Image (cartoon, rainbow, N blue to C red):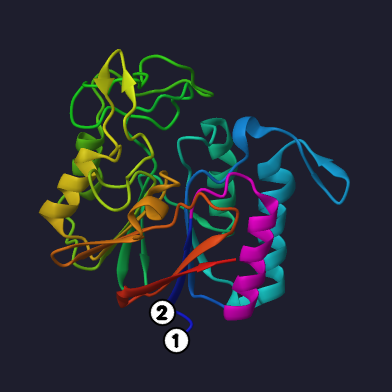
Amino acid sequence: MTQYNLCFFVSDLHGKIDRYEKLFVKIEEEKPGALFLGGDLLPHSLKPQKIDNRVITDFTTEYLINRFDLLKRKMGKGYPSVFVILGNDDARSEEKHFIAHSKKALWHYMHFRRKMYEGYNIFGYSYVPPTPFQIKDWERYDVSRYVYPGCVPPTEGFRTVESTDDIECSTIKKDLEKMAGNMPHGKSIFLFHSPPYKTNLDRTALDGMTVDHVPLDVHVGSIAIKQFIEDSQPFLTLHGHIHESSRITGHYMEKTSTSIALGAAWDGPELAIIKFDLDNPEDAERELL
């Protein structure tokens, strides 16, 4: 495997500095050509943290950007191409920093964007279907305005920035149609935060739970993303969001005809890195550190 073919995929680090530091060590050691960051990268509620007894009040600017900048300076030409999206737990108010440092070549901010890498079209998309949580910056209706029992509609809750979209009429399904258009998907990689519905990657621990006597679905992924994968058969899709899924199902990979889906979310204390060959993602392996 060449440097440019080796890829790392991580997701749902939620501002855990110990996991980030393990990731940076691995990047320096193995020198992947590309790093994919699948969202939920920041601490919950952007709470202050400590590094070496120093209080960090802004995780994005004081830690994440500085740490990636240091890694880039240390690695020089060996620094990987970094593709990043945010997730439903990440405040959209932080998006401006990711966009600004995308322009400075620290990484490629990918939400609703396309970038070529080694002959592959890379796409990014952050939105997830409605959840029970109150922050709605990165939530959309899925294929219709139906909301599962226990979940809060995107029109409710709160946002850290005002939406410019028609929230009531926007859906993940419409977004995917607009984003991908008529692009050929055979050489495409889609970096999603949400997993596809009813797969190995979206299984929750909601067994036997009800809301108002209505049983909850244990699968909470996106129907629109599932349909998109089945219809378009992109070469590879990358997903996060549901931490416990691979523990429950025993799988972090889903195969659909010619398409491979990988899930990097993990609910253990370790850093989970999905390592894959760009041309042979079906041989992907997960390392827990």
> Is 131 colored magenta in this rendering?
no
**Horizontal relation, residue 93 to residue 155: left or right:** right
Instruction: From the viewer's side, name the closer residue of 246 and 192.
Output: 246
**Horizontal relation, residue 19 to residue 148: left or right:** right
- Please tell me whether residue 238 is drawn above or below residue 111 in the rendered image: below
Disc 2 residue type?
Asn
Q: Residue at x 32, y 44 (%)?
A: 203
Q: Quadrant of the N terminus?
A: bottom left
Q: Quadrant of residue 6?
A: bottom left
Instruction: From the viewer's side, name the closer residue of 51 and 168.
Output: 51
Do labels 2 and 1 touch, CB within 8 Å?
yes
Percent of width and height locating residue 15 = 63, 45
Residues drawn in magenta:
11-30
The residue most toward the front is 208
Percent of width and height locating residue 146 = 21, 21
- Please tell me whether residue 257 is drawn above or below residue 6 in the rendered image: above
Which residue carries the number 1 mark?
A: 2
> Is 13 colored magenta in this rendering?
yes
Q: Quadrant of residue 249?
A: bottom left
The residue most toward the right is 53
- Please tell me whether residue 34 is drawn above or below residue 240 in the rendered image: below
Q: Residue at x 45, y 46 (%)?
A: 243
Which residue carries the number 2 mark?
A: 5
Percent of width and height locating residue 54 = 87, 44
At mark 1, the secondary structure is: loop
**Of helix, strand and loop, which mostly describes the magenta segment?**
helix
Q: Residue at x 48, y 43 (%)?
A: 86
Q: Quadrant of residue 50?
A: top right
Instruction: From the viewer's side, name the closer residue of 146 and 90.
Output: 146
Percent of width and height locating residue 93 = 56, 31
Disc 1 residue type?
Thr
**Horizontal relation, residue 190 to residue 275: left or right:** left
